Image (cartoon, rainbow, N blue to C red):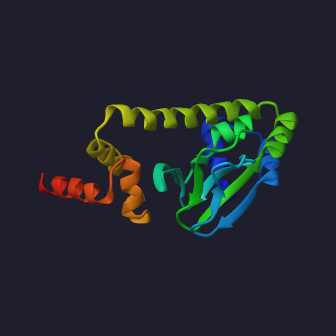
Amino acid sequence: MEQKLLNYFQRIMPLSEQEIAAIVETMTIKQFKKGTVLLKEGQISTEVYFVLEGCVRQYYLVEGEEKTNNFFTEEQWVISMQSFGQQKPSNHYMDCCMDSSLVVGNREKEEHLYKQFPRLESVSRKVMEKVFAEQQEIMSSYTTDTAEQRYLKLLKSRPELFQKIPQYQIASYVGVKPESLSRIRKRLLKK
């Protein structure tokens, strides 16, 4: 399992044997059951996660209704950027929408690794650039794409989600009610 994280880092920048050993030594892998809440609105995030297996959903609670804005699956980072980075209360929730195996990190571990291996800060910066670019792409989709286009993009880029995630959560992510998603799917089947 830990090899997935090491492979991820190695694709960004080759690591020395010492760096690999230090990462493995500080790595904590935890199993979370479906429904486990990792972060609640109002909490300050103290941990970041890397998905080895499973899926984590980020959502907002708006007038009692869940509004999903992201799914994090294998080889993706789960970070509440504002809350973890700036130590501000979260304005969203994060939960495991299926049984998940996650690498769990915190600021203390991160700082220890940076002191020991300053080059790892460059790896971290590249990871954050990738995470930020992914988030920016999702945000722009809500401005420029129709719900049907968002659905098709999700189907093309992340087809595995449709086997793992309840349709009402997919509908929420696309920005429609479940009934509207059903109509979109029927319309697409007729094409």
Q: Is residue 174 above or below residue 133?
A: below
**x then y, percent, for residue 128:** 63, 34
Q: Is residue 20 above or below residue 2?
A: above
Decide if residue 172 is on the left or right side of residue 44: left
Q: Is residue 145 above or below residue 53?
A: above
Decide if residue 185 is on the left or right side of residue 129: left
Decide if residue 16 is on the left or right side of residue 187: right
Q: Is residue 148 visible?
A: yes
**x then y, percent, for residue 110:** 79, 41
In the rendered view of the protein, which quadrant contains the N terminus?
A: bottom right
Q: Quadrant of residue 56?
A: bottom right
Q: Residue furthest left?
A: 190
Seen from the viewer's position, the closer of residues 3 and 78 is: 78
Q: Residue furthest front?
A: 63
Q: Quadrant of residue 146?
A: top left
**Residue at the spot 42% in from the left edge and 58% down from the top edge:** 169
**x then y, percent, for residue 126:** 63, 31
**Residue at the spot 67% in from the left edge and 31% down from the top edge:** 125
**x then y, percent, for residue 10:** 65, 41
**Residue at the spot 65% in from the left edge and 57% down from the top edge:** 38
Q: Is residue 160 visible?
A: no
Seen from the viewer's position, the closer of residues 171 and 23 is: 171
Seen from the viewer's position, the closer of residues 149 and 16 is: 149
What is the tally of numbered marks visible in this picture? Answer: 0
